[in-house]
Amino acid sequence: MLTSFTIPTLADVELPSLRDIFTVLTLQHDYNATIVVLATAILGVGAGLVGSFLLLRKRALMGDALSHATLPGVCLAFMVMVAFGGDGKFLPGLLIGAAITGLLGVAAVAVISRYTRLQDDAALGIVLSVFFGLGVALIKPVTQMPGGDAAGIESFIYGKTASLLRSDLYLIIAVTVAVVLICIALFKEFALLCFDDDYAKSQGWPTWLLDAVMLGLVTLVTVVGLQAVGLILVIALLIIPPAAARFWTQHLRTMAVIAAVIGLISGWLGASLSALVAGLPAGAIIVVVAAAFFIISMIFGSARGVLPRVLQQVRLARTVNRQNLLRAMYELTEAGGTEMPHHVRLPDLLGKRSWSAAQLRRLLRSARRDELVSHDAAGRWMLTEAGRLEAVRLVRNHRLWEMYLITHADIAPSHVDRDADMIEHVLGPVMVEKLERLLVERRAVPESPHVL
């Protein structure tokens, strides 16, 4: 028998007003929402900072294995505390258990990778699945113990941000301050470890100890973040902000700061949206907000973003084509002496380069707008005075570079790259002066060692 149901529409959803949004974002909401927003924002700072080193160290999956390995520790800690007559819901005890099994998981990955023929990815997959499976298996007996059904152990899987207390906020603040101070104190050492650990070993640095400290910081952030976003999503808070920051800068120090800011804003906005709209899980919304920052950074990031790179390639291609056009026109008219004008026809240019007719016409129109070329009624093109000066500069620079490759790099003329960079970007002033002395007996623009 089929039952009818109604599809909810946008009108059925109670959207928050601008006043409500402003109230939550400025921490003027109820007390519990303020605690949650502050805790998740501060957690985002620590996660983004230490996650920057974890990402550059190529240990992102190590953090994933660590987070999943904390679940059996939470369950075992609850059992131990209840067995000794204590409160199984004592949060510091649960977090200590999570830290112990998390570190055991990391140690297991290291042992498997070092003493077996298995690669790191296989070791990570084994440890992640085994520890998480053990934790899921222990949840059932935990819920059957006295008070276990109300312990909220399952909340550590997906997070339960709304249950954060003032004591949890103080713990998160303490851990974040410790993480920030240690990262600042060991910034140089962590940077060397991330970019060249072999050099660090050769210089006598205790790389294993630095790795242990770094993973210890990751463990701290992971453990205190369990209740906020859960062990499944805490790895996203560790990796997504640094990955987003990577698109904006080439410098580690700046990347760490940007990652901390993105983590802060992600926690702030995610927890605020969860407080504004009933039914939205805070942990998941925090990760969604961080993912939105990642997508924006991936597209618009000034250092590695897709859009700036595409625009840069387009500008580079336009510049190269413009230079090739001016050089081709100059070299086609070079035999006629220094008298102007020198006319060039389109078939002559098409025979010297791999342009299509449409592409060549676009290049000529662009150069004409910049007053580098002109044409007459017969359809012949010529270099203007400004275009000729620019063409002479380009040809001279490239031929000096060719001369350098032939006279100093022992490269055969037939193998010289005619599209090499300008000489000012490659050679120092001493070598330029030396090459120019070779041209004393020649014209201002030397002849090319091979045909165009």
Image (cartoon, rainbow, N blue to C red):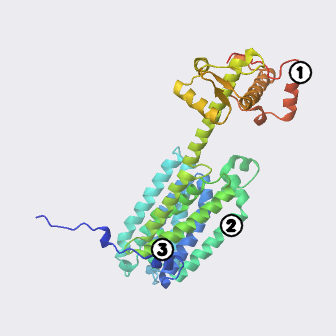
Residue 102 placement (x, y as % from top left): 52, 64
Q: Earlier in the sequence, mark 2 or mark 1?
A: 2
Q: Is residue 364 above or below residue 228?
A: above
Which residue type carries mark 2? Answer: Ile
Q: Earlier in the sequence, mark 3 or mark 1?
A: 3
Q: What kind of element bears circle 3?
A: helix
Residue that badge 2 annotates:
182
- Distance from Cα at disc 3 to Cα at disc 1: 74 Å
- Distance from Cα at disc 3 to Cα at disc 2: 30 Å
Pair 3/1: label in front: 1
Residue 267 placement (x, y as % from top left): 52, 69
Pair 2/1: label in front: 1
Residue that badge 1 annotates:
440
Which residue type carries mark 1? Answer: Val
Residue 151 placement (x, y as % from top left): 40, 78
| Disc number placed over residue 340 in the picture, else none | none
Q: Residues within 10 Å of mark 3 (few under 14, many from 20)?
A: many
Q: Is residue 128 above or below residue 159?
A: above
Residue that badge 3 annotates:
272
Q: What kind of element bears circle 1?
A: loop
Which residue type carries mark 3? Answer: Ser
Q: Earlier in the sequence, mark 3 or mark 2?
A: 2
Q: What kind of element bears circle 2?
A: helix
Which residue: 38% across, 75% down?
278
